[in-house]
Amino acid sequence: MNNFGIRELDVVVIGAGQAGLSAAYHLRRAGLEPDRGFAVLDHAPRPGGAWQFRWPSLTYGKVHGMHALPGMELTGADDSRPSSEVIGGYFDAYERRFGLRVHRPVEVRAVRDGGDGGGRGRLLVETSEGTYATRALINATGTWDRPFWPRYPGQETFLGRQLHTVNYPGPTEFTGLRVIVVGGGASGTQHLMEIADVAAGTYWVTRRPPVFREGPFGEEAGRAAVAMVEERVRLGLPPQSVVSVTGLPLNDAVRRAREQGVLDRLPMFERITPNGVAWPGGVTWPDKVARPDGRTVEADVILWATGFRPAVDHLAPLRLREPGGGIRVEETRAVRDPRVHLVGYGPSASTIGANRAGRAAVRSVTRLLDGVPA
């Protein structure tokens, strides 16, 4: 700590989800010590990253593609337990095993240039527990804190309830209600299939026709999907999720839901009314979907399963965004500031991608600390 009460470190990691813990693990392997060489700051109240906030009905057995953190497998998990408990407990054990000493709950308010100019001096990380001056920053804040709520005419007049995946409580609260689920991703279909068993009626609305994927998702297809997301990030455009370009897996549960008409998709409505939603004339409806007059549906709930955006507002003082609206990233390094690395961003937003990004970021950071040009 210097004379101004600012703690000086080599590296600050923001976020203790999959990407942040992976980075912390590799920092330890590189010889840096927690609270001496680096610190991990996390705003959540306990270990588990965004997993700790998942709805109770999302059991571990329903989780797709959960990859173990580096150096420690997740074994013996009960598929019937909530994923928030299983993965939260795993992250907790991981932090303790490797002595990562995560600081929580800590809010990171802003990251600023320390004033040395040229991107060569220290960054100032302003937090609820004081300010850190760091030579490098690994940002692993993910997306959970920035749910995306679309805006449609009449939204403020709706007399029912509107909620987002981020505060989805599980299916029981929708018993006997008429529910519109908006969104064509994995969360939307999971919500819809659960709710359909207890609701008075459900409707599924998406902007584009969903693409269902038959068979296993191979390594070659995975690389192609990641490459599409990487290209957007290289161009400085807002990243899409990897899931958005892979399609929806067609498993037995999805097949049953399609046969039962639960996953008969409707095009996006034009406006929201006090009692539901409305489409323009000429809209084509699936034969199995009931419609009062062909243009409107009454509902008690609109559930927005419309995804998330990267939680990077605290980086705004560094002016990293490109004209296209995204942060241009090469591997994990922000092009506009080589001291800043983004993991769990864009192509590394999956659990396996987060592991790889954590390792890659630490390799690049150690070069920076050794004075090797990027």
Image: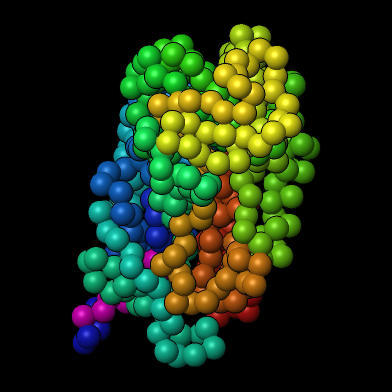
One can see residue 21 in this view:
no
Extent of the magenta region: 5-12
Q: Position of residue 263 (x, y in %)?
A: 62, 20
Image position of 313 (left or right of 319): left
Q: Position of residue 94 (x, y in %)?
A: 36, 41
Q: Quadrant of residue 75?
A: top left
Residue drawn at x 25%, y 47% as measured from the top left: 45
- Indicate whether residue 10 is drawn in magenta: yes
Majority SS type along the magenta span: strand
Above-or-below relation of 220 to 337: above
Residue toward you, 62 or 273: 273
- Indicate whether residue 211 is drawn in magenta: no
Above-or-below relation of 12 to 350: below
Residue drawn at x 76%, y 36% as measured from the top left: 221
Q: Quadrant of the N terminus?
A: bottom left
Residue drawn at x 57%, y 28% as measured from the top left: 296
